């Protein structure tokens, strides 16, 4: 596609400008500890969830694979990093890479088995795969600590220089950097021919197969990449909280991360960045009084979004912008 | 030997409950192609209705079951008419999210009305204690579960295989457009099937209140089991889920008894293998 010329600036300068503009939000966020000291641990949790939701967006938003078991891969990453640390391998980067490999391998094995199916069967299989991992972690108490979670997790300073302090500054910049790298990677991926073939499979897999696209292979690759990113998020959570909870494999988390993504808007790349903070802020505010309020509010919002506003918060924003544009033209 | 038979019996009783709750889900999913995660909500409501009628209003157990079943069927009927039907043509993701929202709302409302704790059911005297059959002492409640379940299932199978309503449902599952073109009002059929399915779920929830405890987390806690029964049994038929429910009831019970260190791992691994081997369930119609 050829973009219409919108300005007199040379193309190279323009792309340099927009690139800088796109870096701006990241720089603003990186400056947050100066403006709001004390909120670093909370922000770190938000970054981890955004990264996790971003990995899910690759599946749900681009590859059209709906999964109710994504926490299985998040938890695998968390437990891989945690177990390694308990057994004496405590370098953060080494454990993160190991955790991503474990999650990717898990995703590969499950993906090969599951992705031939569709619809309810695929949903059930994703759910069963995570439930299986949950039960294994629950019973293998010697390795995982079972229901009590994995304690005694600790890591040596990052790059041998930055210790994970109780203020959470290292964790903040560490997870923000990881999120930035993952985002840049996913953005490049979805704009590559591979990313477009995923959209094609989502829209019409029979047609994509007919024009010679190996759809099974593409879906499995997408699943493995998404698994590795989910594992990265899980490992970051283990490293920044020094704890791995059984909950990190639960259906509860699989459901919540899907809701966070959908509330923000799936298939838009930025949905995770809107949905996760909104969800976590609302949960914090509403669940304070009574968890029932939170469930009620969330349930009603979910039903309202499905019935009235598909596309999440970003979908509403897009429609508002489009409406304003047509109104101004008229 | 005695232990084996007792476990088999407990497993069958558990399977009966799973089947009663899930069979409606299989029929409605097969009919409408709707991924309804919220089916367990109706079983929970049946349980709450039964317990409340008994504890607050002194209604006898069987009458409370019947009234609860009718109330919940009416709720299901109303929800199908007002909300569900707008989502029949929508994507699977929308249906998943909608029914998940419904679960959350029901969990919240139940928690607000009855509090967070499980509601104990006071079984009537004739269901307490044990019944001796030959050398075996079997708990009366579970014996009643099996007997009652078998009776309902016999009635259901008769209705599905031998009545005009059953023939219409089967026709619409097989080919909805064709069924419509020969004059079957599928829209009304959907509503009726949905009401019937939710009523059966309520019956299962009330009857099984001593097996699957009635608490606000009910629809989230057992959803996996109901969906497993449907997915393994196959959509749109009522015999596949029966086999699946019994198999799951017995194997889960046996596993928890003989291999407590394995627990539920076996059941999920088993389901995974079965679904990979036969993606449309063990008794797929097509």
Image: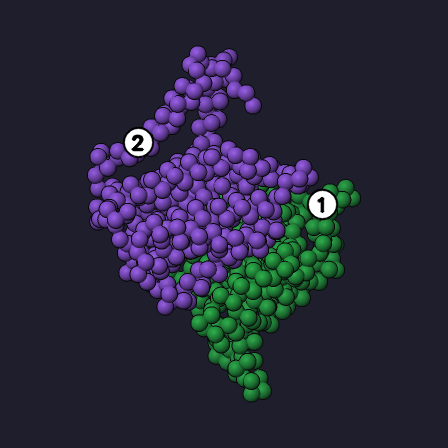
Chain colours: A purple, B green
- The residue identified by callout 1 is B176
In the displayed structure image, the side of residue A264 where residue A47 appears, left or right? left
A293 and A229: which is toward the camera: A229
Image point 30% across, 31% down: which residue?
A27
Q: Are marks 2 and 1 on the same chain?
A: no
Where, by quadrant of the figure, is residue A139 drawn? bottom left
B121 and A237: which is toward the camera: A237
How far is the residue under mark 2 from the one under mark 1? 56 Å
Q: Which mark is residue A27?
A: 2
Q: Do labels 2 and 1 touch, CB within 8 Å?
A: no
Image point 33% across, 40% down: which residue?
A176
Vertical side of B165 occupied by B143: above or below: below
**Any part of residue A31 in sight:** yes
Can you give x and y, in whole percent of width and height, for residue B118 in the image? 40, 62
Can you give x and y, in whole percent of width and height, for residue B208 in the image? 51, 66
- Callout 1: chain: B
Q: Quadrant of the N terminus of chain B?
A: bottom right
B120 and A58: which is toward the camera: A58
Can you give x and y, in whole percent of width and height, for residue A189 in the image? 49, 37
Number of marks in the image?
Answer: 2
Image point 39% across, 57% down: which residue?
A80
Q: Quadrant of the C terminus of chain B?
A: bottom right
Where, by quadrant of the figure, is residue A36 drawn? top left
């Amino acid at each position: 596609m050829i973009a219409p010329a919108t300005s007199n600036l040379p193309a190279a300068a323009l792309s340099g400008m927009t690139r800088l503009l796109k870096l701006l939000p990241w720089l603003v966020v990186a400056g947050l500890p100066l403006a709001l000291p004390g909120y670093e641990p909370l922000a770190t949790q938000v970054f981890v969830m955004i990264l996790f939701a971003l990995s899910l967006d690759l599946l749900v938003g681009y590859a059209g694979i709906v999964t109710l078991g994504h926490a299985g891969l998040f938890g695998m990453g968390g437990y891989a990093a945690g177990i390694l640390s308990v057994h004496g391998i405590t370098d953060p980067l080494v454990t993160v890479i190991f955790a991503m490999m474990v999650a990717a391998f898990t995703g590969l094995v499950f993906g090969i088995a599951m992705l031939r199916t569709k619809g309810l069967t695929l949903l059930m299989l994703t759910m069963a795969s995570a439930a299986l991992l949950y039960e294994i972690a629950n019973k293998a108490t010697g390795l995982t600590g079972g229901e009590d979670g994995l304690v005694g997790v600790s890591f040596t300073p990052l790059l041998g220089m930055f210790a994970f302090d109780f203020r959470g500054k290292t964790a903040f910049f560490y997870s923000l950097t990881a999120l930035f790298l993952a985002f840049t990677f996913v953005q490049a991926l979805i704009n590559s021919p591979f990313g477009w073939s995923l959209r094609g499979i989502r829209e019409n897999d029979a047609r994509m197969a007919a024009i010679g696209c190996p759809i099974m292979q593409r879906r499995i690759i997408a699943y493995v990449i998404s698994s590795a990113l989910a594992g990265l998020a899980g490992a970051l959570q283990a490293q920044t909280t020094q704890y791995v909870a059984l909950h990190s494999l639960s259906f509860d988390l699989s459901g919540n991360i899907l809701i966070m993504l959908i509330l923000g808007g799936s298939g838009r790349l930025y949905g995770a960045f809107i949905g996760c903070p909104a969800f976590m802020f609302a949960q914090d505010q509403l669940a304070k009084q009574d968890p029932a309020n939170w469930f009620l509010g969330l349930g009603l919002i979910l039903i309202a979004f499905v019935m009235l506003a598909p596309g999440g918060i970003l979908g509403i924003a897009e429609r508002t912008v489009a409406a304003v544009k047509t109104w101004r033209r008229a | 030997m005695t232990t084996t038979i007792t476990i088999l019996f407990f497993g069958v009783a558990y399977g009966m409950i799973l089947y009663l709750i899930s069979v409606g889900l299989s029929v409605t999913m097969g009919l409408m192609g709707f991924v309804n995660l919220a089916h367990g909500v109706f079983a929970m409501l049946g349980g709450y209705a039964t317990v409340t009628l008994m504890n607050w209003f002194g209604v006898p157990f069987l009458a409370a079951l019947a009234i609860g079943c009718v109330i919940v069927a009416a709720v299901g009927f109303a929800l199908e008419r007002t909300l569900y039907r707008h989502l029949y043509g929508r994507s699977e993701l929308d249906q998943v999210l909608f029914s998940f929202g419904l679960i959350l709302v029901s969990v919240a409302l139940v928690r607000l009305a009855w509090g967070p704790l499980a509601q104990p059911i006071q079984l009537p005297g004739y269901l307490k204690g044990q019944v001796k059959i030959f050398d075996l002492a079997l708990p009366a409640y579970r014996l009643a579960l099996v007997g009652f379940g078998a009776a309902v299932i016999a009635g259901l199978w008769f209705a599905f295989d031998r009545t005009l309503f059953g023939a219409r449902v089967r026709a619409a599952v097989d080919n909805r457009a064709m069924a419509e073109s020969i004059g079957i009002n599928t829209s009304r059929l959907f509503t009726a099937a949905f009401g019937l399915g939710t009523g059966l779920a309520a019956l299962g929830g009330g009857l099984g209140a001593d097996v699957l405890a009635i608490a606000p987390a009910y629809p989230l806690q057992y959803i996996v089991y109901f969906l497993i029964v449907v997915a393994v049994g196959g959509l749109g038929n009522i015999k596949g889920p029966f086999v699946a429910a019994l198999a799951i009831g017995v194997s889960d019970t046996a596993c928890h008894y003989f291999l407590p260190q394995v627990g539920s791992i076996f059941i999920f691994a088993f389901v995974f293998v079965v679904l990979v081997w036969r993606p449309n369930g063990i008794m797929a119609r097509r």
